[in-house]
Image: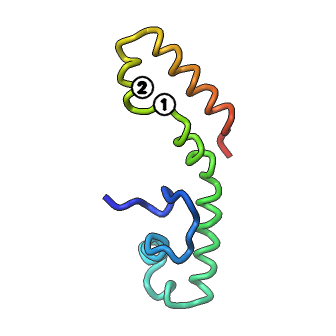
Amino acid sequence: MAKSWLESKKWDEESSSVWKEIVSRWGKADYEDETKRTEHKATLKLEWDALAYARKREAEYPTIQELVVALYDTDDKSAIEAKRAAVKAKYPKG
């Protein structure tokens, strides 16, 4: 499955995923109209910026392997909960 434009680690307004998002939301005619395309790119950039906290959290959250181990080990579960709480405190929702 292709990544959505929101999952990109770096903003790239020329990315094909940005083109796909504009076309799917507003239509191909809006993409072809330079003024509208510029406005839509600005809208998408604002949405992307608003989710910066989520991208930062994802990088520091416990791995899937750590979570699986925590299912069976009470000590690990406490450590995982503490790690998640610390990440959430470090990167609060926008």
Query: Which is more toward the observer, 20 or 65?
Result: 65
At numbered mark 1, what does the secondary structure look like: helix, strand or loop?
A: loop
Three-letter residue code for mark 2: Glu
In this figure, which residue is indicated by the disc labeled 1? Answer: 62
| x 53%, y 77%: residue | 14
Mark 2 is surrounded, within 10 Å at the Cα level, by few (under 14), some (14 to 19) or many (20 or more) other residues, namely some
Vertical placement of 26 versus 9: above or below? below
The percent position of residue 52, horizontal first and vertical second, equals 62, 51
The percent position of residue 9, horizontal first and vertical second, equals 54, 57
At numbered mark 2, what does the secondary structure look like: helix, strand or loop?
A: helix
Q: CA distance from mark 2 to mark 1?
A: 6 Å
| x 64%, y 72%: residue | 42
Three-letter residue code for mark 1: Pro
Vertical placement of 74 versus 85: above or below? above
Vertical placement of 51 versus 18: above or below? above
In this figure, which residue is indicated by the disc labeled 2? Answer: 66
The percent position of residue 17, horizontal first and vertical second, equals 44, 70
Query: Which is more toward the observer, 6 or 78?
Result: 78
- Choose top left, top right, bottom left or bottom right for residue 43: bottom right
The quarter of the image holding the N terminus is bottom left
Q: Which mark is residue 37?
A: none
Q: Are marks 2 and 1 in contact (CB under 8 Å)?
A: yes
